[in-house]
Image: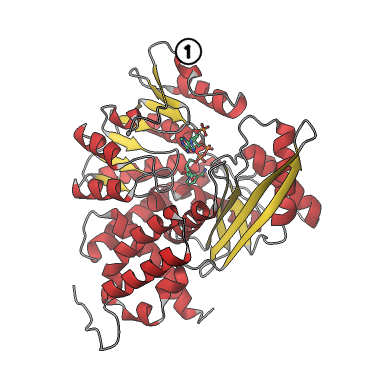
Amino acid sequence: MTSVMTPPGVKAPGDYIESVMISVKAKNPAEPEFHQAVAEVFDSLRLVLAKHPEYQSARLLERIVEPERVLMFRVPWFDDLGNIQVNRGFRIEMNSAIGPYKGGLRFHPSVNLGILKFLAFEQVFKNSLTTLPMGGGKGGSDFDPKGKSDNEVMRFCQSFMTELQRHIGPDTDVPAGDIGVGGREIGFLFGQYKRLRNEFTGVLTGKGLAWGGSLIRPEATGYGCVYFANEMLKSKKDSLEGKLCLVSGSGNVSQYTIEKLLDFGAKPLTVSDSNGVIYDPEGINREKLAFIIELKNVKRGRIRDYADHYKKAIFMPTDIKLEHNPLWNVKADCAFPSATQNEITAKDAANLIKNGVKLVAEGANMPSTLDATKMFLDAKILYGPAKAANAGGVATSGLEMAQNSARLSWTRQEVDDRLHKIMIAIHQNCYETAEKYGTPGNLVNGANIGGFLKVANAMLDQGLV
Ligand code: NDP
């Protein structure tokens, strides 16, 4: 690799990265997840800045870590007893260099500014990798839909959208779902937007099929993650057939990861929620998956009920004193973290590697800590980072936007084929970029650099804005 001589007075790329990282931590205190996401991308960009001093002269790193806009607002609502409740709403409009802001809304009590900034930052690179024209954004609230009635969820969504509608639009910012925001919430949010603005537009994705939604959007993140895993295995002349698989979570991403794993002949063994882990040594088949979908999406129950229904399955309740997650200590070939950030610690990574896991494909966003990521890379297992492996969800949201603009609907097969092709293309881009920058097989570098270059060049083209 050729490196460029650094003129006197100009920082060497490593020092430049270091100084921007120090400033990110100083300017964004108490946001550890944001620091973590930036540090991971910056580590890969060392390889880029050595070849492209123009990014450093344009102070691209300082610009790319600064959101274009941060919105934070009060969301008051009445609960079923007539009491006043107050939550906090957010929308981070991170980067619009290659298209309107695009990214999900998360409703979960853990939501705060730093978590949404990490998600919005990741989203910028992920959306770039999809090959579709979408900028990056993310939003949500510390509202917890668990245990709330449908009417309470509706009143909250209406209050949330009453403010958010001022800032979004089909050519400006197009939110979607994420943790705690599924079809029900998107429906209530869309209804209120339409009522306030008197327009029927594709302002949200993940809509119902009868009112502008796309076939395959609910399935897309899970299906896409498995398509990506399949490409990783193909690069080693291997396949998913017969592989024992660990899946965490039991929500949208987990459910459709399990479905697609079954299509490929793999054997999913686990699911979880915040209260505990299910290990089913006989494997989760289609009938058991239907039980999980009904339990989680209709009854809105807890995953422990699975073990009451299927007696050979084992339920392990969450134990905060345990410094590892027993799910990642079940012997298997492949792991699909699909719940939340930092759910795989260094100890969990050590357990996975010790038990012979050959592949980790991240359905959740940033599920592995920086230490865990490093251990997977050092162990040279197949490691598909979130911004590449789970990009199928937002890619299919992009396809929903295209269908809305053209006012037509594609068939299930057509959307699935496009999703599959996009995941193959993302894998190829990451694989080839990793090779081109001298780190073959390192898909973390491949994804970070591949995603960055397109956005950075668009920012240079558009001047200092
Ligand atoms: P859901 O709300 O449908 O499901 C989330 C699942 O993860 C639930 O089983 C939930 O358990 C569990 N979970 C959430 N937070 C925690 C926590 N702090 N500790 C333990 N378990 C937790 O969300 P999704 O399936 O949509 O999202 C899962 C992950 O995938 C997230 O990281 C999200 O950002 C990412 N993702 C989602 C996309 C999408 O299209 N939906 C697209 C790309 C990424 P419980 O019910 O107990 O809370």
What's the residue at 40%, 58% (across, down)?
A: 35
Q: Residue 162 location in percent, x, y?
A: 75, 53
Which of the two residues, 68 or 169, is positioned nearer the viewer here?
68
Quadrant for the C terminus, please.
bottom right
Q: Residue 402 location in percent, x, y?
A: 59, 56
Element type at mark 1 = helix
**Left or right: 69 in relation to 21:** right
Asked if 289 appears above or below 159 in the picture, the reply is: above
What's the residue at 49%, 43% (across, down)?
A: 220
What's the residue at 70%, 49% (across, down)?
A: 75
Asked if 86 appears above or below 248 in the picture, the reply is: below
Q: Quadrant of residue 233?
A: top left
Q: Amino acid at mark 1?
A: Asp
Any part of residue 39 in sight: yes
| Residue lying at the far top of the rendered structure | 311
The structure's colour scheme is secondary structure
**Left or right: 49 in relation to 67:** left
Q: Which residue is mark 1?
A: 308
Asked if 122 appears above or below 226 in the picture, the reply is: below
